Image: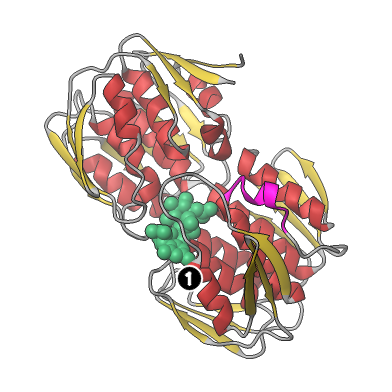
Amino acid sequence: MASIIIKGGNKLNGEVKISGSKNASLPIIAASILSGKKTTLFNVPDIHDTQVTLKILRYLGCKVYKNHDRIEINSKYIDKMEVPESLMREMRSTVILAGALLGRFREVTFSYPGGCDIGARPIDLHLKSFKKLGINIAEEYGFIRCSCDKIVGADIDLDFPSVGATENIILASVFAQGKTSITNAAREPEIVDLVNILNKMGARISGEGTNVIEIEGVTKLHEVKYRVMPDRIEAGTFLCAGAMAGGKITNARTEQLIPIISKLEEAGCQIEKDNTSVTLQAPKRLKAIEIKTMPYPGFPTDMQSIFGSMLSFAKGTSIITENIFENRFKYLQELKRMGAKSKQEGNVAIITGVKMLTGAKVKSTDLRGGAAMVLAGLKARGITEVTNIEYILRGYEGLETKLRKLGADINLVQE
Ligand code: UD1
């Protein structure tokens, strides 16, 4: 089992190049299934979750060529409409493949998806939406089988602006008969990126980035070359590392970072930004703040644990309300091993900042919870060992390498 060992206390300084977005890459890779042709993607991060998705595509019959961050997918020869259970369990976002396979072949079989244990994570909104598009759903022996003769455009009103359900509806209805309209759609930038590539392939989708998205069915898509957007959560993670010790990030889309940047400013950081880079000057000591996670453009739930870790050093009492995933406070128990002070009441965490944490052996409780531990270790006194780092490897490309380049004393150790 590998772990990450950090000797805390080093100042960080320098520039970090942000990798391609995990959450945009996954639906975009799924979109390549739709065309039946070649899709060339640039800026795809080399992380466990993209590796698993590409493994499934190969299993389905796609030809996949990978050269660093450039990936070529030819989906012409797909001959299976079933996502294997073992791979499906490795990550939740494989559910996105269902929408793409349905869109192209009107048939798919998959099991309930896996992923981080950050809450119930049901897929009822996905299935309800598929039904609205005329897709029949049968559940048997833990498998979900979806099929229909044709997909017919429909008006779908989501009970909650679910990112995954919005993406699945878009993918399933690109070839639908007539128009599909999604109201209360998710507005996340990753959805805009998905729509951008689909429209470049010949789809007719509008309203992305707003809460009403319309998809006018088309009959075919063509080859495309596309560059995936930078990862705004990775950018936010490095900004928080900088907020503890100073630094600059580049290759980010600054407008997507506004909810994160404004909270960092509230905590006392000085920030300069242009379109693609952000420079952050950390204060002597951060100030306590209040955070409520919300769908985009609100404060992202994926940044909640990273901020929680950072705020355990802030002066005063911070209050964090988690409105999206109920299990996203597990990391607080681990932080307590390092001397952090917090208490949780339902979906609210109250963090009383301390001047210093002490290094300890702590585990990653999920992907972002793992990154939160690494950040705490950067600032803590002494040695921190972060275990269960397979969570971190799912979503960060070379987190420890990038931090080392900035001056951190950090190593990934294989046992
Ligand atoms: C995506 C992101 C994840 C991020 C989340 C919220 C990917 C691969 N993952 O996850 O990093 O934290 O958006 O920004 O893009 N829900 C239901 N029924 C459903 C679907 C969702 O009740 O059918 C609920 C969930 O339990 C959760 C909320 O809706 O409480 C938001 O989930 P959703 O937006 O769907 O998140 P994901 O797409 O899974």
Q: Position of residue 308 (x, y in %)?
A: 28, 36
Q: Residue at x 78, y 66 (%)?
A: 223
Q: Is residue 398 left or right of residue 349?
A: right
State the quadrant of the C terminus: top right
Q: Residue at x 43, y 38 (%)?
A: 368
Look at label 1 and name its amino acid: Leu
Can residue 239 be seen from the camera position used here?
yes
Mark 1 lies on a secondary structure that is helix
Most foreground residue, 249 or 300 = 300
Would you identify the image quadrant in which residue 287 lies?
top left
Whether residue 43 appears in magenta in the rendering, the answer is no
- Mark 1 is surrounded, within 10 Å at the Cα level, by few (under 14), some (14 to 19) or many (20 or more) other residues, namely many
Most foreground residue, 297 or 318 = 318
> For the view shown, which residue lies furthest in the top direction?
382
Mark 1 close to ligand 1, CB under 8 Å: yes
Q: Position of residue 103 (x, y in %)?
A: 69, 74
State the quadrant of the N terminus: top right
Count of numbered tags: 1
Which region shows up in magenta?
83-91
Q: Which residue in the protein does label 1 denote?
A: 125
Q: Residue at x 36, y 15 (%)?
A: 360
Q: Residue at x 70, y 65 (%)?
A: 109
> For the view shown, which residue lies furthest in the bottom direction?
178
Q: Quadrant of ligand 1?
A: bottom left
